[in-house]
Image (cartoon, rainbow, N blue to C red):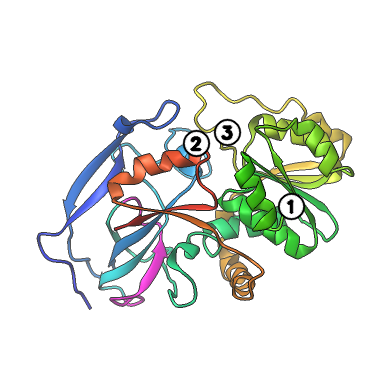
Amino acid sequence: MTTTPSADSTNRQIRLAARPFGLPKPTDWATVEEPVREPADGRLLVEVSHISLDPAMRGWMNDVRSYIPPVGLGEVMRAGGIGRVRASRHPGFAVGDVVYGGFGVQEYADSDGLGVHRVDPDLAPLPTYLGALGITGLTAYFGLFDVGAAKPGQTVLVSGAAGAVGSVVGQLARLTGCRTVGIAGGPDKCRLLVEQFGYDAAIDYRSADLGAALREHCPDGVDVYFDNVGGDILNTALTRLARGARVVICGAISQYNNTEPPTGPSNYLSLLVNRASMTGMVVFDYASRYPEARAELAGWLADGRLISREDVVEGEVTDFPATLLRLFRGENTGKLVLKIR
């Protein structure tokens, strides 16, 4: 079935025009308009309503070897999104289906259906499918349980704890029976960690002596350190590892816009002394297990033991470049989403 938008409909896209040096600038992006076309056999057309904004996007803009190929110059910026099927010649999708997929930063996406799955707007708000029920929640789940191997009674320390992944990690650790300590920037975020996300303690890295605060709140050391920040915070956290600790390297937002090559942590010998491990994790490695994780996350959401917080910005697709910068200024709490109006 097909109900393609009118022939004069246009699709606005945000494409990568240049490799950023430091923070992305307006000149690093190009807005391109293309006509909306009827999908070919085996394809579907999705009108995008919500776009996921993630710190990892900054790494995807660099032409360097990574866990995923970089976005090419002139290509639509890579992004996960939610939208509604407007036309379909694909046997697995019907007009009107609400779906998630890697649709990119654009108003309409033509897709072959690979990696696209239906979501139910009656079960949860659409932004939640980019938050706790999306890649964000899956990252927290597999990072904490598979890589971090968190166990009841252990101490879990999380940096970027008020962000998208960090806010979920802390809650999952609490559900497991762990003691949870979060690191965030500013008193408002730290208050939120304790009052809404259930952290046992919160540390404001902007005002506290981080080393002293970790000694106070993690007196027996840290069993799992879930790192979203990197840099000096990672280096300091390494000084508080318990015997057999696991350090989960999920992200390094403090380093993404550096104009000089990042330096490794000078306290890495703590891994040796404490017989600890430090492991990088990429959620895509667990794709075959997404359904089981989503089922558990959905159950916790349904019974109120897990909160999904989204920071939703309403605007045009052309607001993407400015909205993305909110991540690197620490202005978001929870999952940052651009809702296309």
Residue 325 lies in what quarter of the image? top left
Q: Is residue 82 left or right of residue 214?
A: left
Q: Is residue 334 left or right of residue 19?
A: right
The amino acid on which the numbered mark 3 sits, given as a three-letter code, is Ser
> How far from the left and from the top, in percent, is residue 190?
66, 46
Q: Is residue 115 magenta?
A: no
Q: Is residue 102 magenta?
A: yes
Residue 283 lies in what quarter of the image? bottom right
Q: Which type of secondary structure does the marked residue at label 3 adopt?
A: loop
Question: Going from the N terminus, do you reach mark 2 or mark 1 first?
Answer: 1
The quarter of the picture where the C terminus appears is: bottom left
Q: Which residues are magenta?
A: 91-105
Name the residue: 85% across, 34% down: 272
> How far from the left and from the top, in percent, is residue 54?
48, 47
The amino acid on which the numbered mark 1 sits, given as a three-letter code, is Gly
Q: Residues within 10 Å of mark 3 (few under 14, many from 20)?
A: some
In this view, the residue farthest toward the left is 8
Determine contact: label 2, label 1, CB under 8 Å. no
Whole-angstrom CA distance, mark 2 to mark 1, is 28 Å
> Can you see residue 250?
no
Would you name the residue on which mark 3 appears?
254
Q: Nearer the viewer, mark 2 or mark 3?
A: 2
The image's mark for residue 148 is 1
Q: Which type of secondary structure does the marked residue at label 2 adopt?
A: loop
